[in-house]
Image (cartoon, grey):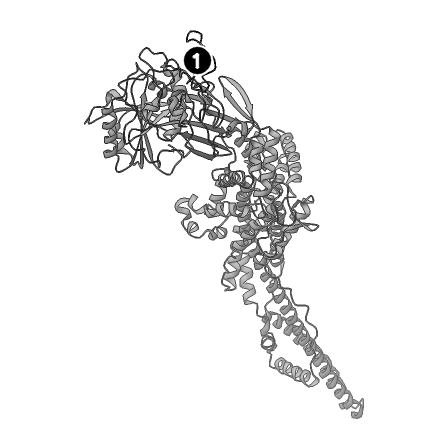
Amino acid sequence: MAYSVKSVLTVFLASTGPALGVRDVLRDLSAAGLVAPFVWVDDAGVTPGGARIPAVETACGADTTVVLQDVLASRRVDVVRLCVIVPGARGTDPVRVESERALADLLSSNSGGARLVRLRTVLRRPGDTPSDSVAVALAGWHNLLVAPEDSRGPGMGHESLTETTDPVDVGRHAAPVIAGIVGLWTDAEHAPFDEQPVLPGSTLRVVRSFYRRLDTSHAEHELRTHLLDFGGQLPLPRDAGTAVVYADDVPAATRTMAQALWVKHRHLLQGERVSAPPAGAPRLVKFTDALTMFFSFLVAVLRNAPAQWAARVGHRASAAVASAAQSTLFGSAQGARRVVVRGVDADGRRVGWSEYEAASRQIGAALDGATNTPQSAAPDLSSLWRDYARAALTLADAAERSPGLPTIQVGAHRAVLRSASDIVPGPDDEFTDIPGVVSATLNVHAAEAPDLLGIRDFQARLRELEQDPTIGLDARRTSAALAGWVGRIRRSFAVTFGSILADGLSAGITEAGMLLERLNAAEAPRDLAEASADQQARMFRQVRIATLGFLAAAIVAGVLAWQELISWWTGGPVIAVCVLVWAGVVAWICQRTQQYLEQLLVEREAASAAAAADRRNLRSALREIENLTAAYRQFLSWNRALGAFLAKPLGVTDHTHAVGRSIEWGMPRHSAVGIGSPEPAQVERVADALRQDMFGVGWLTEAWDAVVGSAGSSLGAAGLDIDRDPTLLAAKAGAGSGSPLDEWSLRFHRGERQASGAALMWERALGELSGPRGDLARELLATIEHRADGAVRRYGIDEFLAGVGQPAAEGFFDPAVFTDTAAMRGLTTVAETASTRTPAGCGLVAVTTQYTEGIAAEDLRTMPSDGHPAAPVDIPQVPDLELRPAEPTHDRADRPAPAPFVAPVADGINF
């Protein structure tokens, strides 16, 4: 259909003869995609009051037999244009006036109130003998005579067409003019007589039309490829006031951004650690307090209850919780501890990083259950991943999107990275150079660049496989290729930030293993009552020995004094000394026992505090393992989506160049189709200039928001909540979980879902070319190829258009069809010009239609019945009156014959 918001139906009514040539040409133009569909009705098939009128509908060069009433009943039509093709030469089959009126009435009454535009186009050449049965003009119609001339453009010289009834010749020149009259050209809203009032009476106009189509599909294809296909290199965004440059030190730029992101969000993934208190210093007590403690202990000794005293003093060192945690931790969770610490399962299989998550969760649950500690909820990492995406986009388009994540600076200028793979490697950056036998053995088909833990595991398995005598060589080659690939991708932002997560996870696993081993190796605290009883037994044994010794000495001294072997003055002091020394020795023994029990309590408190600190740190380490593992899964998912997006931020940029049918021969001068044929260097210059205007700082924001915003709708029922609130996507679980984030990122990574910004960006480019950057469009159209009669000709755009589609100056029609009187009256002058110039991509469609004011049928030159033009009429000169009779006169026979006067034929006024 015509390029219009209206729904238009174009109906032709014609008879056989020259009109068939018009139909054939219109069909060819339809096959070339130049004219809209139309319906052709044969005059012979129209009967007044006929219920079903047969017709042929032509679309894209194909004819379909239809019934006109069915067409009207099945479509909503706003405008119906009825064009009757009237052959004006004698010997042709005329269109019956009754058929014209009947068809017009049918269309008016059956088109659902659509506006009916009645057009009659008369085909007549100079020298044609007019048919007596043809009504040249009918009242109530636009009566139009197709000018029998051919010209390249308005106001230019023309070729007068000679008389003929050959349908091919008539159709070749008349069909393009009729297409312009009835608004049949595609991509051009040009129907000059839709709003033109019908002239009164049986008047007609002489009309001509010019058409130009500039096809730039090939140039657009090349430009689109250069403009939107970055080839892995990101464009330099435009910044108002300052220039944006490429950062040459890629590792420094990615490391700076990764560290800034980690510093901002590390509190979400790292827990606090506690240190065991230092060894207890000797407690300072007062002398009176020391005596009180000694005598209380001495009383306890005398009562044979030092254990109760020790338990009363050591209430601070209860080991019930520690014992429960110890037995729980190294009882039921022994298998999990074995996995975490040793990294190899019972079958000797190397455990992957993902299995530490389940082991740490099991041990953590055991710890929480033993200590009656409620389990803490997993942290919400959505802010981390939103900032991760913003940081990656900032490295690509130099727009600061989040506080704490500034743009990279090179001197005083903002900087971006040159390649998308330096930010987040995409699907094309995966390592796939794996021999089939190695891939089948390890069940590894590709390695993703940001998956450092997966790469490390792959390298370790390759090292084990290198010892195999069968595939060891392939394993070594794969390992070498993998090492080279890792060296190339390690500088990217994704790999740099991934190494922070991977190192944190590895450190957490190592710390948890060390703490578990230390807790397992720690001796169980000895029961305080048992230790006190043992020490009490030793103390009583020592006291008994001392008592017996001093008692024996006192008895000996008493016996000697009683036997008067020594005097009582000597024996008495000896007995007193024995008693005092015994008391001192017993006090010393009791003091040592008290010191031992005090030291036991201090050591017990220190061990309990150290174990508590280890358990608390173990719980923090296990929670970090859980959080970092979950974060690493999300990290892999976001990298899959971001890598695929940055590789093709505008989506599929491969624009299929649809090569239409070209017209090699047959087009008249007034209608032409040209093809823009710029040089590759011109296309590249235009693309570079457009990039500077279109890709400003932050140009990726809109495209990325559109990708994330459409994630929910692409997942169907699984993404209903995300469709309502796209921010929920960042909180979903990551790779391997089957979550909406995992599913969406995998689809994006595989190319099943893509960004859709290419069409929008191309529309902006076309807007720039048709608006403020029209100079770039002219550079694309510097050379235009036009095929005329099989020969290729090259023009500039102005020469090719020849004024078509622009306001034209006054001109003149070929006066061969006008009478001399009409020519002298100036009726050959162009009265009105309707010009349309419509952009079609980078090209355009231009149509100009010119017509005279209303003239009568008598103003058209007629032919006598013999078919030859009438001879020029001689107008004799009026002789001068003789004012002086005296002058000699001549006889009539001698008088020279007057020269005949022939009215000159010229455009405009005749002089």
Q: Quadrant of residue 86?
A: top left
Image coordinates for residue 743, horizontal then vertical, percent: 47, 43
Q: Nearer the viewer, residue 339 or 67?
A: 67
Q: What residue would you read off at disc 1?
A: 898
Is residue 587 shown left or right of residue 723? right
Image coordinates for residue 336, horizontal then vertical, percent: 54, 51
Q: Nearer the viewer, residue 692 or 596?
A: 692
Q: Where 508 sits versus 644, above or below?
A: below
Mark 1 surroundings: few (<14), some (14-19) or many (≥20) residues within 10 A: few
Image coordinates for residue 479, horizontal then vertical, percent: 64, 35
Q: Residue at x 60, y 60 (%)?
A: 617
Q: Where 769 sits versus 283, above or below?
A: above
Q: Quadrant of residue 404?
A: bottom right
Q: Where 69 sits versus 622, above or below?
A: above
Q: Residue at x 50, y 48 (%)?
A: 705
Image coordinates for residue 476, horizontal then vertical, percent: 65, 33
Q: Nearer the viewer, residue 51 or 125?
A: 125
Q: Amino acid at mark 1?
A: Pro
The quadrant of the image that shows the N terminus is: top left
Is residue 90 shown left or right of residue 448? left
Is residue 100 shown left or right of residue 551? left
